[in-house]
Image: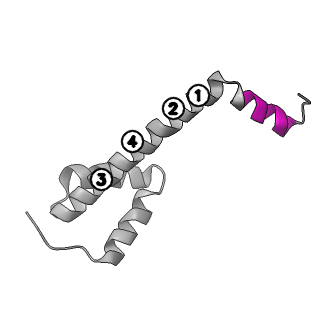
């Protein structure tokens, strides 16, 4: 178990890496499960929790917006349909 602190640049690099679709998410899961450095593993887990919270928030906003017809009004406005 490695407790070596990560530099701010490593955190920055990991955040950029994790934000890449598919490839970054694979690295995120690998680091969250099996990173030998405790700090890297905890950062990956916190980033994963952040993504889950954002996805749940977006789902709630989508469901509320869809229920109120907001999504359809936005699509109609984009297509130029008069209300």
N-terminal of the pair, mark 4 or mark 1, is: 4
Q: Mark 2 to mark 3: distance in Å?
A: 21 Å
Residue 71 or residue 42, whichever sits in front = 71
Q: Is residue 75 left or right of residue 16?
A: right
Q: Position of residue 14 (x, y in %)?
A: 36, 65
The residue depicted at 63 percent of the width and 30 percent of the height is 65
The answer to which image quadrant residue 83 occupies is top right
Relative placement, left or right, of 11 versus 61 is left
Task: Give me the disc on residue 52.
Answer: 4
Question: Which residue is label 2 attached to?
Answer: 60
* Numbered disc total: 4
Q: Which badge, 2 or 3, is on the more N-terminal residue?
A: 3
- Along the viewing direction, whichever of 83 and 38 lies nearer the viewer: 83
Q: Which mark is residue 64?
A: 1
Residue that lies at the very extreme toward the left in this rendered image: 1
Q: Secondary structure at mark 2?
A: helix
Sequence-first tag of 1 and 3: 3
Question: What residue range appears in magenta?
Answer: 71-79
């Amino acid at each position: 178990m490695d407790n070596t602190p990560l530099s701010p640049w490593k955190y920055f690099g990991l955040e950029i890496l994790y934000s890449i679709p598919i490839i970054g998410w694979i690295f995120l899961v690998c680091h969250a499960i099996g990173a030998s450095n405790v700090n890297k593993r905890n950062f990956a887990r916190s980033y994963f929790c952040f993504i889950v919270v954002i996805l749940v928030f977006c789902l709630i906003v989508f469901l509320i917006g869809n229920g109120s017809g907001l999504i359809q009004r936005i699509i109609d406005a984009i297509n130029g349909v008069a209300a």
